[in-house]
Amino acid sequence: MAFFLHYLLITAITSVVLFLLLRASRLRRLRLPPGNLGLPFVGETLQLIAAYKTENPEPFIDERVSRYGSIFTTHVFGEPTVFSADPETNRFILQNEGKLFECSYPGSISNLVGKHSLLLMKGSLHKRMHSLTMSFANSSIIRDHLLVDIDRLIRLNLDSWTDRVFLMEEAKKITFELTVKQLMSYDPGEWTESLRREYVLVIEGFFTVPLPLFSTTYRRAIKARTKVAEALSLIVRERRREYERGEKKNDMVAALLAGDDNFSDEQIVDFLVALLVAGYETTSTIMTLAVKFLTETPLALAQLKEEHEGIRAKKPESEALQWSDYKSMPFTQCVVNETLRVANIISGVFRRAMTDINIKGYTIPKGWKVFASFRAVHLDPDKFKDARTFNPWRWQSNSGMSSPGNVYTPFGGGPRLCPGYELARVELSVFLHHLVTRFSWEPAEEDKLVFFPTTRTQKRYPINVRRRTASSS
């Protein structure tokens, strides 16, 4: 018996060694992008995380681009990865989703959003569900159904503001409540706030080691995810009973129940979990940073106020914004564009090569990860003049800006273009309207940006606010 076990051990070790040697030999024959794989197992993960925990993570990519070029090899989060800071390569990666590349995220994210989430769906099912999601957030739906709730819920939140608020916290409440309303037709209350607090814990676990034994944060996130799933399961079961009785609502849950795919409760819950994360985290951060950048750019803030005071002057104080009002906010859209460009809430996307891929004279081996960096392109001075300066006027039609469209990808692109991109723009525009016409503010203390595990301000951007009166306007 001992001899047999010894034989199996030697055979296993020999097989592993041969596999590694054959793979190394194969990789040597390929022309990989230049780079450095760093330390064994760890690679350059620690350098990447350290850079993104600062207010200026650019050097991680900048130093490697200057040394190796806009496409380089590194090793992060346990896998060899090709980084792209090249807009043409990024576009190639995005457009070939499902053909040459497939989505691939760290295990911690995959486990927490759920295997049935839109983030992890592939093939024809992803195409159908992406189309369904976009159909609930297109311009006509926002105009005819969602805008009234967006305006009402933003007003409701701002009504509760006192002299000092943590803007990032308030923005998260707003976006979470809006998303819950759009997905499940629930108005704000104790239940939605309780659910939001659990969501905070889930998101904190996204960029941790996906081993509960070694990570307290991940263990806490898994428990919170279970609570979220249980709460949503109760809603889905009740809505299924309502649907069978012929009661219908115009929201995402109703569409999932009425579809031809016969989704289980678990599938619907996973789908909702991911959409709540997407609608909550990113849009709230954009709101906060738009205010931060405007506060630091007084001329832009003054022009934004002028635009919105002009809109408000034509309407009674209590009257909600109409779609025509939203479409008459040209400078606001410049502010939105520039906030998205500078902030880079989504710094890039991970994909996995489905086969050996030749691009720009290099080969990306099958199974390797690639990271298309939007941030590196958006902050490239060769693509945008004074790229790291917040300058909303660069987006005006007469500004002389001539950058090609594929260098600006704040919402991704290809088959996985963010389905809520228009909705996010509307929510931010309405929020800015009510903020600048109802309040003046100043930072309560100095705060700075960090980008890991998600983009945020360190202190949740505390501000001192003062309600504006007719005389102070």
Image (cartoon, grey):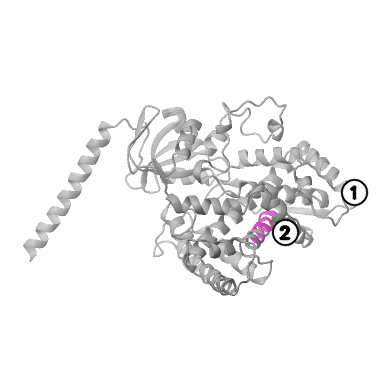
Left-right relation of 339 to 320: left
Magenta stretch bounds: 165-177
User: For the point 85% across and 57% down, which residue is it?
Assistant: 318
Q: Few, some or many C-alpha atoms within 10 Å of disc 1 (few <14, some 14-19, many ≥20)?
A: few
User: For the point 60% across and 73% down, which residue is it?
Assistant: 242
Tag 1: residue type? Ser
Indicate the quadrant where residue 191 lies: bottom right
Instruction: Find residue 218 and report its horizontal and vertical position in percent.
Output: 46, 62
Tag 2: residue type? Asp
User: For the point 64% across and 66% down, which residue is it?
Assistant: 249
Q: Is residue 399 visible?
A: yes
Please identify the quadrant where the N terminus is shown.
Answer: bottom left
Check the image and report above or below for 156 versus 378: below
Q: Is residue 379 visible?
A: no
Check the image and report above or below for 152 versus 292: below
* Residue in the foreground of this view, choosing between 119 and 14: 119
- Indicate whether residue 275 is drawn in magenta: no
Say which mark, if any, is on residue 112: none
Tag 1 and tag 2, C-beta contact below 8 Å: no
Name the residue carrying label 2.
Answer: 149
Indicate the quadrant where residue 132 lies: bottom right
Instruction: Find residue 397 and report its horizontal and vertical position in percent.
Output: 71, 29
* Residue in the foreground of this view, choosing between 186 and 25: 186
Question: Which SS does the magenta portion mostly show?
Answer: helix
Real-space CA distance between mark 1 and mark 2, rounded to the nearest whole angstrom: 28 Å
* Residue in the foreground of this view, choosing between 225 and 47: 225
- The number of discs equals 2
Name the residue carrying label 1.
Answer: 472
Instruction: Find residue 460 and report its horizontal and vertical position in percent.
Output: 65, 54
Element class at badge 2 = helix
Instruction: Find residue 35 and report its horizontal and vertical position in percent.
Output: 37, 33
